[in-house]
Image (tube, rainbow, N blue to C red):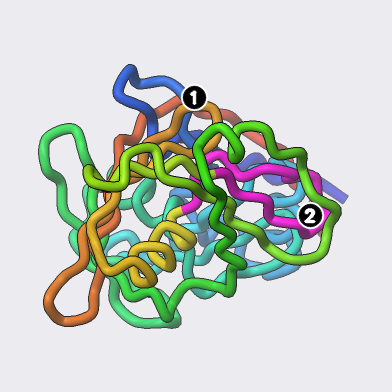
């Protein structure tokens, strides 16, 4: 056995107005360096982020998304993050093409709620109730939310993946934000986790724009065992 050194950019996606918080994301720019599905899954498990992205073709925007335990056909925060990092206009995924744009401090993607994996959207009477929640037992993926200011579209939310893979609470969940936006039929300003911010805006054709701030946290090298 020998080790292959893989360079990973670590981003924080959906940072708050002060630039803090955000959901950690690993991006392997040279996806060809980790071609095997099993090796990609193992690297995502080792990193332990809610998602890790492998870029297979930066010109076409072809990317593959893994959680610590499975591959996803679509996820919000990885696409916002990689679009910002590589300044991409289009991302190519199994669900279809996802268009991206930069607007000042925000990076936006245009997606459809039906692309998002299933989530249980559970409304609470107040933001304080959401704040007081304990992490539920593994089972279903729960997106807990309550209004901070309904007239202004401001939402307090927390995400509990329930997969039992070490990610007890998701700091910022783009897919769930899409589902909630579709359910409510309006633009939202979501404060999730410790202080992450997600913005959404429904389009006239059934699409939804999802936007947020992205920050490069660090770049790291991880050794991955390879057979010779």
Identify the mark at residue 121; answer none if there is no mark.
none
Looking at the rendered structure, which numbered label has been put on residue 218? 1
Can residue 85 be seen in this snapshot?
no
Q: What is the crowding at mark 2: few (fewer than 14 residues within 10 Å), some, or many (at least 20)?
A: few
Q: Is residue 43 above or below residue 73?
A: above
Residue 158 % position (x, y): 57, 44
Front in this rendered view, residue 208 or 180: 180
Residue under label 2, please give it: 226
Task: From the top left corner, tell me how far across and down residue 176 is, in percent.
Answer: 48, 60
Q: Which callout, 2 or 1, points to the residue nearer the camera?
A: 1
Residue 170 picture quarter: top right
* Residue drawn at 69 percent across, 55 percent down: 161
Inspect the magenta stretch and tell me whether residue 160 lies in it: yes
In the depicted view, which residue is nearer to us: 196 or 188? 188
What is the CA distance from the residue labelled 2 to the residue labelled 1? Answer: 25 Å
Q: Magenta stretch mostly in which secondary structure? A: loop
Q: Residue at x 12, y 77 (%)?
A: 204
Quick one: which residue is furthest to the top in this view? 18
Question: At which x and y percent is residue 75?
Answer: 48, 63
Picture quadrant where residue 189 is located: top left
Residue situated in front as seen by the camera: 185 or 39? 185
Q: Where 184 sits versus 102, above or below?
A: below
* Residue lying at 48% horizontally and 72% vertically, measured from the top left: 116
Q: Which residues are magenta?
A: 158-173
Q: Position of residue 89 (x, y in %)?
A: 18, 60
Q: Is residue 225 above or below residue 215?
A: below
Q: Quadrant of the C terminus?
A: bottom right
């Amino acid at each position: 056995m020998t080790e292959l050194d893989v360079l990973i950019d670590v981003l924080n996606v959906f940072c708050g107005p002060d630039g803090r918080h955000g959901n950690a994301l690993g991006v392997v720019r040279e996806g060809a360096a980790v071609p095997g599905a099993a090796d990609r899954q193992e690297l995502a498990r080792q990193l332990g982020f809610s998602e890790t992205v492998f870029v297979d073709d930066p010109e076409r925007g072809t990317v593959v998304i893994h959680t610590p335990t499975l591959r996803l056909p679509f996820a919000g925060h990885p696409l916002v993050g990689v679009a910002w990092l590589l300044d991409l206009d289009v991302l190519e995924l199994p669900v279809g093409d996802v268009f991206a744009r930069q607007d000042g401090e925000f990076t936006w993607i245009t997606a459809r709620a039906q692309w998002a994996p299933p989530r249980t959207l559970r409304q609470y009477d107040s933001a304080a109730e959401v704040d007081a929640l304990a992490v539920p037992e593994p089972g279903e993926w729960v997106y807990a939310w309550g209004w901070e200011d309904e007239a202004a579209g401001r939402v307090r939310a927390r995400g509990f993946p329930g997969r039992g893979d070490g990610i007890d609470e998701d700091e910022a969940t783009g897919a769930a934000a899409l589902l909630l936006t579709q359910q409510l039929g309006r633009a939202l300003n979501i404060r999730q986790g410790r202080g992450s911010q997600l913005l959404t805006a429904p389009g006239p054709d059934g699409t939804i724009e999802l936007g947020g701030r992205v920050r490069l946290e660090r770049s790291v090298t991880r050794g991955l065992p390879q057979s010779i």
